[in-house]
């Protein structure tokens, strides 16, 4: 007899013995048998899961039956959890035999078929038969999760993520677009079978872009909705509340829509990962463009900024860029407005009284306030150059300016962290095709494109983590990701000391039709 046949005949005998004597055997005897059986059945499940051509329902039947066996053999929840974790380890071992090339999928299919026949020959006694809910205390079809049951937000069918952002108020379009982009990526992944058979789900909580509401939104996502991690949170002042909450719970905080340092510590926080470049990188690119390409003297560059950590980050980036150019940052004019308002009158009054004429403004604002500032200064300073960081929401800004008239839109610059959505790179085409498929009628947007890219990076990491998903393993996988090609024209990746995937800044400027055209920043 071959070793393979010996193993599976023995597995069949062990299963028969366990099931036949389940009601009379001691608890320790039953768990010992299950432990031995898990070491034989788990690798078969794992090798089959590593092969895409093996139908998942076949594998699920084995998992379902073993769930019943584990429940029947366990005298308490701790014992059950221990057995499930043992099975998980052996499943991972089985996957590794295929992914490392030690076994091919044809052999994995034969082993699964042998195990299927072995189980079919085994009769389940009434005490623990699948139809006996009372005996097991679980649903007849309950499956053993491929992860331990204590993993927050993960089941054998689903992985839940949360997003806290403004879905009401002046910044609501940023939250809506970020969620739209993530949902687009999740829908595409789910249609292809999800990640290890689990569907990806995004749950939203509205914080109105107010940090005083962020804690409650995060609590709702973690405690009530039981999410596994956070993706795509929008805002800098809100991140100052959300990040500590996530870190206390060792929860993934991924792809936030902010370029501020609150999500960029050195060394990086273990659970915080960014796709986008920092506001310092964006404003550095903007200042260099204004000084070197447009020949604007530094003293004639001002900053229009939200009066909170978002605006602070933009202003600090400009100051840093000045210092890098060997110019003092002490004279930089900062024009403020209050968050969640469009009251820009004080900023304009400050601008009016300046002795040195201002010829360019670097803006760290959201779209409505930015549009209002441009509207009220456009005729006063007809040659003013307006540059915005990507946090403004490029598409929303274009829409706001077009409502005022083409002359307000023409020439407005936005530094972007994704390529122009009017372009034809493979990443842009993938995004637009997916958006049209899952959300017909929605126009391509820079914020939703960013959400789409961030979500796809996370999906790749989830796939590489495998069936035994937990946060620590996912973090380890993220930190090992190098040279990920999503069609952006630049490789993406992380490291233990690098939790930002991209450092690329794209320049765009609006034309009179409200369309962004690519511009060279240097």
Image (cartoon, grey):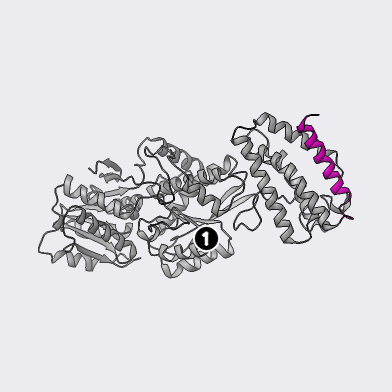
Residue 236 x %, y %:
38, 61
Q: Is residue 198 left or right of residue 313?
A: right
- Residue 75 versus residue 365: which sits nearer the camera? 75
* Quadrant housing residue 425: top left
For the stretch drawn in magenta, the main secondary structure is: helix
Q: Is residue 498 above or below residue 113?
A: below
Residue sitting at x 15%, y 55%: 298
Callout 1: SS: loop
List the residue tagged with mark 1: 250
Q: Is residue 286 above or below residue 368?
A: above
Q: Is residue 260 left or right of residue 207?
A: left
What is the quadrant of the C terminus in the image? top left
Give the magenta range: 1-25
Residue 9 x %, y %:
82, 36
Asked whether residue 177 is in view, the answer is yes
Residue 323 x %, y %:
20, 56
Q: Residues within 10 Å of mark 1 (few under 14, many from 20)?
A: some
- Residue 70 versus residue 431: which sits nearer the camera? 70
- Residue 25 versus residue 331: which sits nearer the camera? 25
- Residue 393 versus residue 462: which sits nearer the camera? 462
Q: Please tell me whether residue 326 belongs to the stretch shown in magenta.
A: no
Asked whether residue 119 is in view, the answer is no
Residue 251 x %, y %:
52, 59
């Amino acid at each position: 007899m071959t070793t393979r046949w010996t193993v599976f005949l023995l597995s069949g005998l062990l299963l028969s013995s366990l099931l036949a004597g389940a009601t009379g055997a001691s608890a320790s005897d039953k768990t010992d048998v299950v432990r031995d059986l898990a070491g034989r059945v788990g690798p078969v499940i794992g090798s089959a899961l590593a092969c895409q051509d093996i139908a998942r329902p076949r594998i699920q039947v084995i998992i379902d039956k073993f769930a019943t066996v584990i429940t029947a053999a366990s005298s308490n929840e701790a014992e059950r959890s221990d057995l499930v974790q043992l099975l998980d380890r052996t499943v991972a071992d089985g996957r590794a035999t295929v992914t490392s090339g030690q076994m091919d999928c044809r052999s994995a299919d034969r082993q699964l078929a042998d195990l299927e026949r072995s189980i079919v020959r085994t009769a389940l006694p009434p005490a623990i038969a699948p139809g006996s809910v009372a005996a097991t205390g679980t649903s007849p079809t309950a499956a053993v999760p491929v992860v331990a049951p204590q993993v927050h937000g993960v089941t054998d069918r689903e992985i839940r993520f949360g997003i806290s952002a403004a879905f009401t108020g002046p910044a609501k379009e940023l939250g809506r677009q970020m969620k739209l982009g993530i949902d687009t990526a999740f829908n595409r992944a789910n249609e292809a079978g999800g990640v290890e058979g689990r569907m990806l789900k995004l749950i939203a909580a509205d914080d109105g872009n107010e940090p005083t509401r962020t804690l409650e939104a995060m609590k709702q996502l973690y405690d009530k909705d039981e999410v596994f991690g956070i993706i795509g949170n929008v805002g800098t002042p809100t991140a100052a509340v959300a990040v500590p909450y996530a870190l206390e719970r060792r929860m993934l905080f991924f792809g936030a829509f902010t370029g501020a340092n609150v999500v960029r510590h050195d060394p990086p926080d273990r659970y915080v990962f960014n796709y986008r470049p920092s506001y310092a990188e964006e404003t550095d690119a903007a200042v260099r463009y204004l000084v070197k390409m447009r020949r604007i003297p530094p003293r004639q560059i001002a900053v229009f900024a939200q009066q909170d950590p978002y605006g602070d980050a933009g202003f600090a980036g400009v100051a840093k860029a000045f210092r890098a150019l060997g110019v003092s940052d002490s004279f930089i004019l900062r024009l403020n407005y209050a968050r969640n308002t469009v009251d820009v009158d004080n900023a304009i009054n400050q601008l009016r009284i300046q002795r040195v004429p201002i010829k360019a403004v670097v803006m760290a604002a959201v779209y409505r306030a930015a549009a209002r500032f441009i509207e009220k200064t456009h005729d006063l300073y007809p040659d003013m150059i307006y540059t915005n960081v990507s946090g403004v929401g490029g598409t929303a800004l274009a829409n706001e300016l077009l409502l005022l008239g083409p002359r307000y839109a023409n020439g407005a610059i936005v530094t972007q962290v994704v390529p122009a959505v009017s372009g034809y790179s493979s990443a842009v085409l993938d995004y637009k095709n997916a958006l049209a498929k899952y959300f017909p009628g929605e126009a391509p947007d820079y914020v939703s494109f960013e959400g789409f890219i961030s979500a796809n990076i996370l999906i790749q990491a989830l796939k590489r983590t495998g069936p035994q998903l937990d946060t620590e393993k996912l973090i380890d996988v993220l930190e090992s990701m190098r040279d990920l090609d999503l069609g952006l024209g630049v490789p993406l990746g992380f490291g233990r000391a690098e939790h930002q995937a991209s450092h690329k800044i794209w320049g765009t400027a609006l034309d009179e039709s409200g369309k962004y055209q690519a511009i060279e920043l240097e």
